[in-house]
Image (cartoon, rainbow, N blue to C red):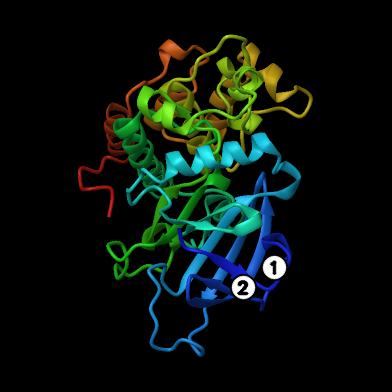
Amino acid sequence: MTRLQHNRASIFDLRPGDKVMVGDVPYSVKKAARGGMGFIVLLWQDSEKAPQRRSVHGMKLALKTVLPDVADREGVALFKRELTVWAAFHHPNIVWLNEILDGGADGWIAAMDWCLGSLRDILKAKHRLPLKEATIVIDDVLEGLSHAYRQDQVLHLDLKPENILYNLDIRRMGKGSNDPIHTSRFMVSDWGIASIKQPKLNAIAGMPPSSQSVIRTFNNIGTLLYMAPERFRQGFHSSVASDVFSLGMIYLELLTGTLPFRAEIHPVQSLLSGQYYNDAHTLMTKTSVPRKIRELILTMLAPLVRNRPSDHVALRVSVVEAYRSATGLLAKLFN
């Protein structure tokens, strides 16, 4: 396991300009940021000190660990569980985990791709996306989710624009556009509350020490506005349809610029009563989302699990068919 070294008391004390060694390769800190339960440090290789040295991590590298205020016994165990799951994924639509570093007193540190930004960043800049661009994003995410479930029966359970990152993709560059949607690929990140349905992997990954209390609340961790209604009901067991619901919310948000919730109704109440569903229909109608796409998204957002798509591959086919029907295009949609 490669050692991470620096002159600060802890990784959480790192500041821009600080020097960090990843093994024997020198890097400089460009940015340190907190988000959710994680702490992220962005590094740039110090080429002046090592002009001929190449790192397996490349010139740019991101480090991730759990924040100190949640780094208790269970928090650390959850992070190790995430790394165990994440390390098994090798797919262009899942953020790559390069290596697990030895952070000394700070414990395990994830060394990962330094991505250009998140889908949330794009939404903040553009407010909403045209149909083609939104569908490209959804297709990429579906590819990543499909791989995770097909390989190890892993569900994400915390899909939201903040957890969808993007990076330049050489296959999509050089087509006459500088828009990140057309020059990048979108990747799923943050598997911290993933549900593992494959028994062998689940046994390897394990649960935190006081597993009974965690199991009782595990399905209710996430971001309220993107969580499926059944996740707020006692005794719920997650399924592919749970992630499909979250993806449907993201698709709706990309096309309309907002989510189907009212200020006067608590989101959980709206989700449990089904009010969000009616509001989603009204919202998409007002913003002129094409009928076929509207119908598809409403199916993804169905209040009852059994009425939602439950197969990633079949859903991807439905997305492409709905797009082509809505636009009248038979040409290939994706770059």
Q: What element carries label 2?
A: strand
Q: Do the residues labelled 2 and 1 touch (CB within 8 Å)?
A: yes
Q: Quadrant of residue 202?
A: top left
Pick the residue in front: 300 or 218: 218
* First along the sequence among labels 2 and 1: 1
Report the residue at 33% width, 52% height from top.
Answer: 92
Horizontally, residue 15 falls left or right of residue 206, namely: right
Q: Residue 27 carries which label?
A: none
* Above or below, 105 relative to 287: below
x and y, in percent, of residue 244 in the image: 44, 27
Horizontally, residue 183 falls left or right of residue 50, namely: left
Report the residue at 43% width, 26% height from top.
Answer: 203
Q: Is residue 76 visible?
A: yes
Q: Is residue 255 visible?
A: no
* Above or below, 202 relative to 278: below
Pick the residue in front: 67 or 231: 67
Pick the residue in front: 213 or 38: 213
Q: Is mark 1 on a helix, strand or loop?
A: loop
Q: Quadrant of residue 13?
A: bottom right
Report the residue at 52% width, 51% height from top.
Answer: 119
Pick the residue in front: 233 or 122: 233
Rounded to the nearest angstrom, the CA distance separating label 2 from label 1 is: 7 Å
Q: In which quarter of the image is residue 77?
A: top right
- Tell me the amino acid under the disc marked 1: Leu
x and y, in percent, of residue 241 in the image: 43, 21
Q: Residue 14 carries which label?
A: 1
* Above or below, 234 relative to 65: above
- Tell me the amino acid under the disc marked 2: Val
Query: Looking at the figure, which quarter contains the C terminus?
Result: bottom left
In the picture as drawn, the residue positioned furthest to the right comes out as 264
Kindly identify which residue carries mark 2: 29
